[in-house]
Image: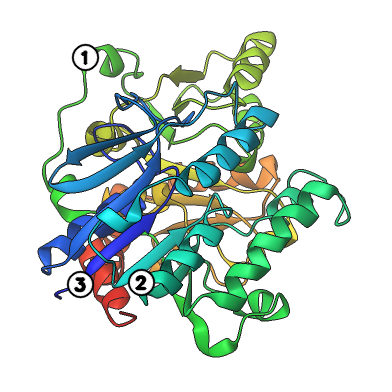
Amino acid sequence: MNKHIWIINQYTGGPKYGMNYRSYYLAKEFKKNGAEVTIFAGSYSHLFSSLPKVDGFFTNEKVDEIDFIWVKTPVYKNSKSIGRMWNMLVFMLMLFFLKVKSMKKPDVIIISSLSLFPIINAYFWAKKFDAKLIFEIRDLWPQTLIELGNMSERHPLVLFLGFFEKFGYKHADRVVSLLSNSKKYMQDKGMHDSKFQYIPNGIDLNEVLNIEKLDERFKSKLPQDKFIVGYVGTIGIANALSYLIESAKELRSNTKIHFVIVGKGGEKEKLVNIVAKEKLCNVTFIEAIPKTQVQSMLSHFSICYIGWHKKNIYKYGISANKLFDYMYSAKPILHSIDIPVDIVNIAKCGFSVKAENSKEISKAILEMLKINNDERMEMGMNGKQYVLDYHTYENLAKQYKELF
């Protein structure tokens, strides 16, 4: 694949810096296939575990042989602050000042949300260099603000973001969605149906095959000889962890079961306070761990939990990274969600229950505790095989290659 690919994804990280990983993993696979890749990313993200060192407005860095251009962006307080929106706007505005004439001409430009704003930069660069423009949608913005943020469809911010969303659907050569059922939604926003391509998230095999041992400071916090219901990932509003905490409250008298929540995020303090107020001794919080130790942490769980809110937006699909990490770990999964197409059911790798229903969650936990180890192992192995068959980044990059 003799191509030069530009990836514009403000929140791209990687093992060195932390979330978000998708663009980094795809870039690695593109390079294996002979492509040159340049990633344009912002210097600050609330999800980074460490920040890149920037010198001036634009800083070049080789990260695992991938060319990064770090665009200096302002710090913000949290993911829901006005400062984050300013951070996104600055990223887009700064790109207009990047001297792209001195750079090697791209053959393909991929703009990956969130943020939507750089679709403008990508569009003009694609015209300038006669490059193919691919608009990648990881989440549906601004629809997420309407449904999870309870914003009006006429809110100025919703209308503002909607302009960039529709611009991308109209002007991109192809639209890649991580959401399997989102085609109709995008068509209603002006996308021609021939542009749509579903390419989900997945796992990087090299990373999961080279895992690190769990650091003793994390391992020491895990309960011993317990049936552990575990969660690893961002602790945010979308993750609906309050229902897992409510389930812990309902099951507090069962001394065999313990809940472990690993990660950081805007909702963590609230959940910690609830656990303290209720004096729940069956819940342990552990700080965010390195990506390279996630599989080691999952190996200590009995089952892995992932949950969502009861929102219409999820009918378009979900593609959480943690779900594929869970599946690769060969642990059975408890999935709390209301969607027509559920990968946990398809892969036969666990139980799915209704969203926002702690009693259903508790019932499923007790049922998974009751079944024998062989049945749980079979569920876990079903998930691992499914992710190896359909969700490795090697496989996903091949699907992308067809679009080039």
Figure check: 359 above or below 401: above
Q: Which residue is mark 2?
A: 129
User: Label 2: how many residues lie within 10 Å, few (<14), some (14-19) or many (20+)?
Assistant: some
Q: Residue at x 64, y 69 (%)?
A: 167
Number of numbered discs overlaid on the protein picture: 3
Which residue is identified by label 3? 3
Image-based side of 57 in relation to 274, left or right: left
* Labels 3 & 2 near each other (Cβ < 8 A): no
**Residue kind at label 2, given as amino acid type:** Phe
* Residue at figure coordinates x 30%, y 65% from the top left: 391
Which mark is first along the chain, 3 or 1?
3
Query: Pointers 1 and 2 in contact (CB under 8 A)?
Result: no
Give the left or right position of residue 157, taking residue 277 as reference: right
Amino acid carrying label 3: it is Lys
Quarter that holds the N terminus: bottom left
**Which residue is situated farthest in the bottom direction here?**
194
| Residue 391 vs residue 295, the one in the foreground | 391
Residue 216 got which mark? 1
**Residue drawn at 19 percent across, 56 percent down:** 28
Q: Secondary structure at mark 1?
A: helix
Q: Is residue 217 above or below residue 55?
A: above
Residue 197 placement: quadrant: bottom left
Q: How is the image coloured?
A: rainbow
Of the numbered discs 3 and 2, the one sitting upstream in the chain is 3
